[in-house]
Amino acid sequence: MLTLFKAIFRWSFRLLLLALVALLAIQLWFAAHIAYWVKFNPSSTAFMRARLEILRENDANAKLRYQWTPYQRISPHLKRALIVAEDAKFLEHRGFDWEGIRLAWERNRREGGIVAGGSTISQQLAKNLFFSGRRTWWRKGQEAVVTIMLEAMMPKQRILEIYLNVIEWGDGVFGAEAAARYHYGTTAAGLSAQQAARLAAMIPSPRRYGPASNTAYLRKRTAIIYARAYGVQTPQ
C-alpha cells in the first residue's frame, strides 16, 4: 500500500510540474507577442480574424476594412473622445479601474443583468488582440494577466495607438482610418471633434450603426462625450 501511495504521489507531482511548465510556456507566448508589438504593428487580431471568418460564411471573398495609421496621424479629438467614452482614468491606472469595476458590478446587480462594464482600454485591447468566442473564467483570468503584461511592457501611448487601430467600428470595419473613411469619407487625421465623439459613442455596439445612423441614444451619447472631451489629456 505504501508503494502505491508513493507511485501516486510521484505521478501527481510530475503532472503538476508538467502543468506548471505548460502554463509558463503559454505566458511566455503571450509575452513574446506583446514584446514584438512594442515596436512592430500587429497585422490583425484574434477578434478581427473571428469576424472575417463569420463574414466569409456568407461571402467567401469578404475582406475587412482596415488600414494601420500611426498615432501622430490620428485626430487628437478621437483620442480624447475615446478616453472619455471608454476609460476616463486611462493615464492614471495600471490596467484596471477598480472603482469603475465596482460601480459596474453594483449597477449590473441592480438591473439584474449585464448592462455596464468596467473594462479599461488596456483590458479591451488584451481581449481584442488574443481572444474571441465564448467567455469563460479561465479566459477572464488570462485577459487579466495579458493586461498586466501590456501595462508593464508598453507605454500608454503605444497601448492607445494599437487600440485605435484595431477596435471595431462597423461590420468588418476596424481601426480609426477605416472608420473615418467608412462613416465620414475623411481620414483619421481629419476627424472633427463632433465626428470623433460620434465614433466613440458607437463603440459598445459598433455593428449597429452605419454611416447614416442617427438614433436618439447615439445623439445623446455623442453630445455627452463631445462636452466632456475638451481638456482631456492624452498620452504624448
Image (cartoon, rainbow, N blue to C red):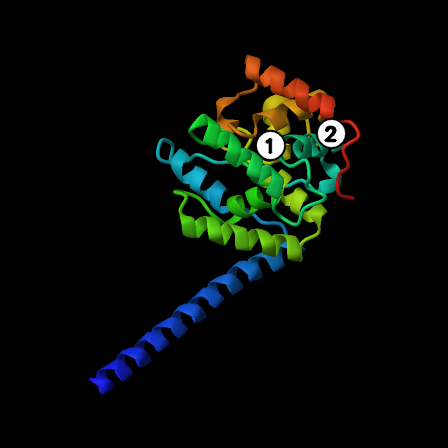
Left or right side of 57 for 155:
right
Q: Which mark is residue 86?
A: none
Residue 208 in percent (x, y) is at 49, 23
Dot placed on the residue nearer the N-terminal end, 1 or 2: 2
**Contact? badges 1 and 2 (CB < 8 Å):** no
The residue lying at 35 percent from left, 35 percent from top is 57
Label 2: state its secondary structure: helix
Q: In the image, is residue 197 above or below residue 146?
A: above
Residue at position x 62%, y 34% from top? 86
Quarter in which the N terminus is drawn: bottom left
Q: Is residue 192 visible?
A: no
- Of residues 10 and 56, which is closer to you in this image? 10
Res 45 visible: yes
- Mark linked to residue 178: 1
Binning the other alpha carbons within 10 Å of mark 1 as few (below 14), some (14 to 19) or many (20 upward) gives: many
> Of the residues shown, which amino acid type is indicated by label 1?
Ala
Amino acid carrying label 2: it is His
Residue 27 rendering spot, x and y as whole percentages: 51, 62
Q: Quadrant of residue 149?
A: bottom right
Q: Which residue is mark 2?
A: 77
Residue 186: image quadrant is top right
Q: Residue at x 63, y 38 (%)?
A: 164
Task: Between residue 160 and residue 53, name the one nearer to us.
Answer: 160
Q: Quadrant of the C terminus?
A: top right
Could you say which quadrant of the image residue 17 lies in? bottom left
Residue drawn 41% across the image and 34% down it? 55
Q: How many marks?
A: 2
Q: Position of residue 100 (x, y in %)?
A: 60, 37
Q: CA distance from mark 1 to mark 2?
A: 16 Å
Q: Which dot, 1 or 2, sits closer to the camera?
A: 2
Instruction: Tell whether 127 sits left or right of 75.
Output: left
